[in-house]
Each structure stands twice: as structure tokens, then as C-alpha cells.
Amino acid sequence: MTIRALIVDDEQLAREELEYLLRRVDDVQVVAQGKNGVEAVDLIRTHQPDVVFLDVQMPGLDGFAVLKKLLDKSRKAPLPNIVFATAFDKYAVRAFEVNAVDYLLKPFDEVRVRQTLQKVKSRLAEIAAGAHAHANKSSTSNGATNPGAHAVAPVADDRLDALVRLLEQQQAPAKTSTAKIVLRVGGRLLLVDQRDICFASIEEGTISVVTHAIEGHSNCRTLEDLLDQLDPKLFWRAHRSFVVNIQRIQEVVPWFKSSYQLRMEDRRHTEIPVSRAQTKRLRELFNL
């Protein structure tokens, strides 16, 4: 079964990166791309894709508004699988998982994209099996079958209402994170104020945290876990391997092909790359 995918993101580089990753997977066809929420609604209506990769943060009609429009329409028409593409931390997207709506954190990761597509395939297979069973039952009752259109995922009214409420909660102010985190420095466990952290990085499963005065290691297993402990107003995942304190960026350095690096305030003045998918966020932060 070929999965028909639609990509909607206002940043061209993010669309191109995701399309590249999707085309590396067998049985996936990217039927169209859109650059804003208005186009998303029209393209979904036109192409009826199996899955929509939808950016959350877009000017005008954002991803939340697009979904609400689709939810209103889906009372009469089935809703396609929605995969959110977002820079939100794990707290903000956990509700999507509970409601069987998947997500991809930016910058995109090929392994994670493949996992998402596997979820979509499994879901479509379940829907097709259910439709086949329903058709057989109808055939037995009426003596005729009713072939369905391309399979998309119907969602019950109560789950639609629950999802709308959850999406609205995502736009509420985030809870305050703890002020300090624990770092292993030599044989000691030090409590470090978040504001003193310059950046954190991960390499071969080990997370290093750098302040102006010390360097240590976190017990967290992933950067996502570390981000759960950090203030989202201060910390930004500029690259899949780096989290930076926005207040500790000393200089934004233009790099190759309209990319950037961040020179930090630590003793080594470490330069950290900004991924292509996060370039838009960098420009928003500093009005570049």
C-alpha cells in the first residue's frame, strides 16, 4: 500500500528536508506541498491524503487553526492522519500521542520519520480491515457491496472534542520548570542554576552541560529529557545535538548557504551549528 503524504510548512528548507526523508522510504508518495494553513485546508480537500505533515507554527492560520477547521469538516468527512511538525518540547506534544496523533520534533530525524510512517501504515491497515468487514456485512444484508474511497482515518466525535480541548491547552502558558539541575562533575553532584547554563550537547548517548565556570554531565538519557527540566523561555534546541541558552548567545555567525552558527559565552566561546529547520526560529528570535 502506498501512503499518500502532504507536507505543509511555511519554511521551504523544512519542507525540502522532510520531503527528502519521506522519499527515502518505500511506498510513500508526496502528493503536494503547502506553505501556509489556508493552502493546507484546500490541499487536503483536493488530494485527500492519507497523512498530513503539518507545521504547528505558521503565520496567519497556524497548525492548530488548520486542525480545528478539519475537525469541524470531519463531522461529515473523515479526518486524515495528522502528524505535527513542531519545535515544542515533550510536554507539549505528549497529548498528541495519547490521542493517536503523531508528531515529529524539529530538526527532523530519519529514524523518527520512519517510525511515524510505520504507525501510519498500521493505522491505515486497521481502517482498511474495518472497512472490508463492514462492506462484507453490508453485502450480506443488502446483497451488494459499497466500495470505499481511498482510506483515511475516521475519528469519533468524542475524541475530536477531546483533541480540540488538548490543542487549546497547548497554547496556555507552560508550567514553571525547576530552577536548578544536577550535574556530575568528577565525583561530585553539583546543583547548577539554569540561568548559568550556556549550552548542552549529546554525543554517543552522553549529555554534557557547559556553564561559564564548569563543565559536567547530566544523568538524563536524551536531550528531550533534559529539556523537560529546563525553562522553555530560556532554552532552545538549535540543532538535534545541541540545546542553547538564548541569553548566553554571544554572537550569531553567518555560515555557508544562508546557514548560521552560534558563538556562546562559555570560556571556549564554543561555536554551535543551527540546523536548517531551526533557521526560521533563529531569525524570529533576533529579527535577522
Image: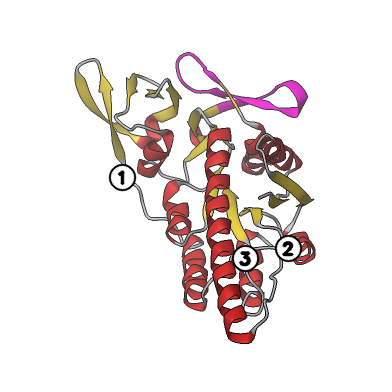
Residue 266 sits inside the magenta stretch: yes
**N-terminal label among 2 and 3:** 2
Q: Is residue 195 left or right of residue 184?
A: right
- Looking at the rendered structure, which numbered label has been put on residue 178? 1
Tell me the quarter of the picture where residue 197 sits. Answer: top left
Residue that badge 3 annotates: 67
Real-space Cα separation, disc 1 to disc 2, in angstroms = 44 Å
Front in this rendered view, residue 131 or 170:
131
**Residue ID at (51%, 74%):** 156
Residue 265 sits inside the magenta stretch: yes
Front in this rendered view, residue 146 or 22:
146
* Residue 32 position within the rendered picture, expressed as x and y whole percent measured from the top left: 78, 51
What is the three-letter code of the residue carrying label 2? Gln
Front in this rendered view, residue 18 or 60:
18
Q: Residues within 10 Å of mark 2 (few under 14, many from 20)?
A: many
**Residue ID at (66%, 55%):** 52
What is the three-letter code of the residue carrying label 1? Thr
Where's the C terminus, which quadrant? Answer: top right
Whether residue 195 is situated above or below residue 124 in the rendered picture: above
* Residue 108 visible, this angle: yes
| Start-end of magenta stretch | 250-271
Real-space Cα separation, disc 2 to disc 3, in angstroms = 14 Å
Q: Residues within 10 Å of mark 1 (few under 14, many from 20)?
A: few
Real-space Cα separation, disc 1 to disc 3, in angstroms = 33 Å
Residue that badge 2 annotates: 48
- Colour treatment of the image: secondary structure
Whether residue 55 is situated above or below residue 281 in the rendered picture: below
**Residue ID at (73%, 63%):** 48
Of tags 1 and 2, the one toward the viewer is: 2
What is the three-letter code of the residue carrying label 3? Leu
